[in-house]
Image (tube, helix red, strand yellow):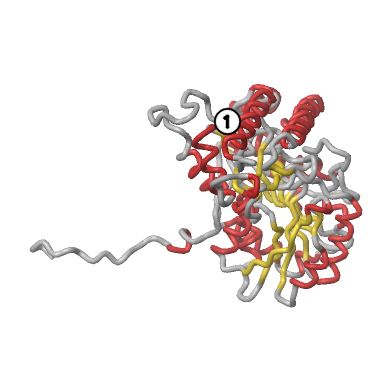
Amino acid sequence: MENGSQRKWQFGGNEELNTAAISVRGALAMLMNNVNNPDDGDHHPQRPTIMLGRGDPTEFRSFWTTQSAVDAVTDALQSFKFNSYCPTGGVLEARRAIAEYLSRDLSHKLLAEDVYLTGGCTQAIEIMVSVLARPGSNILLPRPGYPQYEARASFDHLEVRHFDLLPEKGWEVDLDAVEALADHNTAAIVIINPSNPCGNVFTYQHLEKIAETAKKLGIFVISDEVYGHLTFGSNPFVPMGKFSSTVPVITLGSISKTWIVPGWKLGWIEKNDPKGIFDKTGIVDSIKNYLDITTDPATFIQGAIPQIFERTKETFFSNIIGIMREAADIVYEMTKEIPCLTCPHKPQGSMVVLVKLNLSTLEGIDDDIQFCLKLAKEESVIVLPGVTVGLKNWLRITFAVELPVLEDGLQRIKAFYQRHSKKQ
């Protein structure tokens, strides 16, 4: 060793982290690395990059959170009451405020003990997937869907079975497929409502059918409602917890999208279970035990929650929804002018929409990833390839940007199409 021979180190990275499903963040980083360089002589080197691939509009003043939320955080910090560790599950006052807020839409009243605070909805996903990852178990995930579920399931060795969302039926769940996929090892079905990545909002009737199907199969529902109430179409938002008398429901949520503060990382796991099934089956104990060994959301953000919920005026939400409604109209109408894109339905909720990529109209582009890479390089526009969310040769477009920016981005996509369209 001392004579110059190479030491053999006994450690290495966890290769399973390198083989997990593709992430939104990883895909966006790849595309940003492909944005044109001012020195390479490409098409429009001086134009700013337009990000239509990420649901984070915080850079735009029209999407800034309400001043009352900022004041609540300031007050929590200046009180010096929230500089400590927090108890398992979160600060009691924050859990109680969230329970009261969520109970407004339910037929039953949530208690503070029904809410567990997490570091954003991402940590809530990690916790619930880990809770279910018993040997031999499987979980039913939507396709298309949010890739964090599959990535975490892969890491936890939890088998994933995909059911389709049907674009011809407004992205409803293929319930026949759900019944065919489930077996005695299936633990839960995940739904995302309002939908990321599709932009649809499930009707009351469809949610009721999902609940009845889950009950028939003996599984529970995990309902990702991080975009809850961010709706602007004909279907109102209905929380899955309304059907908890039929089937037990775990709801995942956060303040990230509704208050436009994704960096504050305050989410929750909400237990809708009036019959106490989660207690009897050990799910509650597993959630609590996971929370005992993981990190907590910042205590001062938790401390601000009661004031945030109490003092945010309804006009803040209505203003955001008004912008999103207009943006949804723009993206739906302008994609009609781009022959390589087909938008099956005008988005009704969330901040995103899925559009089909018509490769037959394009020259020299083989799939959605190649389309997005070329678009980033030539037009400095970032959209997410559909393969990232489980649907190859589709695109996920985020329309939570200021309207002139959205229009500019879509015009650039149209120019890109015109440059790459097959000559007649």
146 left or right of 219?
A: left
Q: Can you give x and y, in whole percent of width and height, for residue 232 in the image?
A: 82, 35
In the picture shown, does residue 122 fall above or below 5? above
Which residue is rendered at x = 71% and y = 58% of the image?
142
Find numbered disc 1 in the image and state the secondary structure of the residue it sits on: strand
Question: In the rendered image, which quarter contains the C terminus?
Answer: top right
| Closest to the observer, 179 or 208 | 179
In the picture shown, does residue 144 fall above or below 219? above
Q: Can you give x and y, in whole percent of width and height, for residue 216 in the image?
A: 85, 71
The residue at the far front in this view is 424
Q: Which residue is mark 1?
A: 50
Q: Can you give x and y, in whole percent of width and height, for residue 287 in the image?
A: 66, 60
Amino acid marked by disc 1? Ile
Which residue is rendered at x = 59% and y = 52% of the image?
388
Q: Residues within 10 Å of mark 1 (few under 14, many from 20)?
A: some
| Closest to the observer, 19 or 334 | 334
Q: Can you give x and y, in whole percent of width and height, for residue 391 in the image?
A: 66, 55
In the picture shown, does residue 54 fall above or below 268? above
Question: In the rendered image, which quarter contains the N terminus?
Answer: bottom left
